Image (spheres, coloured by chain):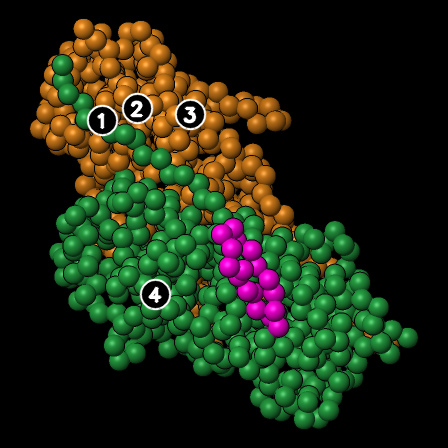
Chain colours: A orange, B green
Amino acid sequence: MPQSRGQVLIGQAGGPTAVINQSLVGVIETALEHRSVGGVLGSLHGIQGLLKGDLIDLSRERRKTLEAVARTPGSALRSVRKKPTEEECTQILAALRRLDVRWFFYIGGNDSAETALLLSKMAADARQDLVVMHVPKTIDNDLMVTDHCPGYPSAARFVALAHLGDDMDSRSLLGVKVNVLMGRHAGWLTASSALARVHDDDGPHLIYCPENDFSMDGFCADVDAVMKRLGRCVVAVSEGIHDSKGNLIGASGERDSHGNQQLSGSGHLGDLLVAALKAKLGSKLRARADTLGYLQRSFAGVVSEIDVKEARKVGRFAAEKALGGSTGSASVSIVRKPRKRYRADFRLTELERVAKEQRRMEPAHFKGGNDVSSEFIEWLRPLVGKLPRMAHLAEVRYEAP
Amino acid sequence: MPQSRGQVLIGQAGGPTAVINQSLVGVIETALEHRSVGGVLGSLHGIQGLLKGDLIDLSRERRKTLEAVARTPGSALRSVRKKPTEEECTQILAALRRLDVRWFFYIGGNDSAETALLLSKMAADARQDLVVMHVPKTIDNDLMVTDHCPGYPSAARFVALAHLGDDMDSRSLLGVKVNVLMGRHAGWLTASSALARVHDDDGPHLIYCPENDFSMDGFCADVDAVMKRLGRCVVAVSEGIHDSKGNLIGASGERDSHGNQQLSGSGHLGDLLVAALKAKLGSKLRARADTLGYLQRSFAGVVSEIDVKEARKVGRFAAEKALGGSTGSASVSIVRKPRKRYRADFRLTELERVAKEQRRMEPAHFKGGNDVSSEFIEWLRPLVGKLPRMAHLAEVRYEAP
């Protein structure tokens, strides 16, 4: 009678990452090892699967498949962007009771932590025997408490590699290149482009994050100054930049049920910035914009090795704590040890401290309104790992003999 | 008196690739080994460097630097998009005479081959002792005669990896995902997205190339059919798609001196396709567009191993033939040997056969107007190399006991 021992249920929510399935497999393998667990279920498309009865038996997966899934980007259990209504929460809790689920692991960002908090509160009120564990992931790196979020180092690596190559491309044909990066409220991912700099004149030359107000005039003047100095300018800009009144510079109308505006999946902001530059600096200016889009979170084959390991460990840690009975509903955070060489520990955090709230970059992470500080770069470097070296010719001028 | 033995001059032009510097170093190392060569010069920004006297001494570069440069994306000698006027050709030939350049290597696409042809003809008319060698590169793969172009396999690998991951992302959150890919006249790069397919329901589900007329109604109907079947649809589309009258679907106004319209560096086409889908299939449809842009040709760290080797060999081959005196002005093509395991040879080709002309995909490469054939996929596969495996869960439905 496995049911009598209580079941584990796992769901994934929000935007996928390159390593979110490492956390999934971390939870599964730990749960399968645990004697008190009667079964390990997966809910497809997050809480949607519970509402619709779309559940799979994860104990039937082969070990080899799980390892291969762990190395695959995207959410293997599918995902959802959905804030449940109170009625839906009631339905979800009823479904969990029916299934004898005593441990619910929800792998996601701050919206998913909010869902986890809602469910854990209602379960406590109803005295339902349920631990809801939020397992953090997000390429946006905007969760509170934790040093950084699983998924972010791999996305930051993608952004750094893109800018390493893009800077060489910019040297080849000159002009202005604007790269629009994910991050609606926080500039962590945009800021990671700074890792592409090695030499003094390397791009990105300007970095704009949502933590600082954006002015189109200031932007055009900044670009103009870099163009005059180098004849080229690579710009990294967050999709979430806004003016001093908080109006988004490049928003479309679409919103999800958490109230988030759609910013990604459109080239609108990049095109708008290029048009502004041409209007201000001259229509003959060679200016191009790329919106790096979903590749930042899903590109196959680019991961940070530290991220891979930590994402797995965060899943295992959440499962060990919950199944060991040493915690009620909670989230997990990564604590960086104060050592020269990067080392990290994992700790439990109250859901209240993670739910909904967004952690933004700090003033010390910036250098003026259009760049990041060396403090930020040194914080980020170990997470992303070693980057390939971009080589330049010595360019000794030819003198006719 | 090295001048008396005649000098080699090298330039790079057009859009860079991930391996264009392999060809550059292939020419340099071969020239440096050759007794009849008095000096090896680099012209910065292609022919522009000759017109402005912006020349560097490549014999002063360290071997270690050259090897590192070979592994760096972008054009190490910088690039240019410029068709010289007759007067400029006269100036260029005069500069080459002054420098005692007897071998001019121009690494580029069909526009650069056109420039090479112009210069070689005028040099022949003036009885100037000059061999102009066109060394092929282009991620567009649209050069005549050759089996494929150096640079294309690496760009195709990037596109395949992007679609491998993007398909997992699409499975997670469903809806329509449109990816706009480089290629103004030919669909080679867009078509390479097909390598991301392993399982029956893997994306991209629809592939649109400029070789086939594009109809917005047909597109919406195609997407609708896939959505009804799978609940999601990943689309790969060339930036150069056009209607049956030849009008580009997503053109901006900008043109270069070769008469090419600017298509890349804007998210316009993707946004236009998403808007059309929402208008036709309902505004609630989750539809997103990414324009992969310049990352396709410059992303640091993604190369095809075969491409790396062939790009180097193409440079060496061009230099050996030209410096060995066995050819006049010419271009180089890659010939695929008719064997089971991929093998290639290099041959000389007349510049007339490569200049300006674009090689498009053939009817046999397509399956209807919205897909590629297995013949195309089998042709491409060995060039791109082994791809990572994307794993799916077995998804055994949970049955309550």
Q: Amino acid at mark 1?
A: Val
Residue type marked 2:
Glu
Question: Residue A187 location, x and y as percent?
Answer: 42, 45
Q: Which residue is mark 3?
A: A312
Q: Are marks 4 and 3 in contact (CB under 8 Å)?
A: no
Q: Earlier in the sequence, mark 2 or mark 3?
A: 2
Q: Are marks 2 and 1 in contact (CB under 8 Å)?
A: yes
- The local crowd at label 3, few if under 14, some if 14 to 19, many if 20 or more residues have their Cα within 10 Å, is many
Q: Look at mark 4 in the image and give the residue it sits on.
A: B364
* Sequence-earlier tag: 1 or 4: 4
Q: Secondary structure at mark 2?
A: loop
- 3D distance between C-alphas at marks 2 and 3: 17 Å
Q: CA distance from mark 4 to mark 2?
A: 41 Å
Question: Label 2, label 1: how many angstroms apart (C-alpha)?
Answer: 8 Å
Question: Does B346 lie within the magenta span?
Answer: yes
Say if A144 sits above or below A139 in the image.
Answer: above
- Residue hosting label 2: A61
User: In the picture shown, does residue B344 fall above or below A340?
Assistant: below
Whether residue A118 is visible, yes or no, is: no
In this view, which residue lies farthest toward the front?
Answer: B339
Q: Looking at the picture, how far across and down is residue A154, in whole percent?
A: 46, 38
A89 sits to left or right of B113: left
User: Residue at position x 41%, y 63% from top?
Assistant: B188
Q: Nearer the viewer, mark 1 or mark 4?
A: 4
Local SS, label 4? helix
Parent chain of label 3 = A
> What's the mark number on residue B396?
1
The part of the chain drawn in magenta is B332-348
Specify the amino acid type for callout 3. Answer: Arg
Mark 4: amino acid: Ala
What is the quadrant of residue A116 in the picture? top left
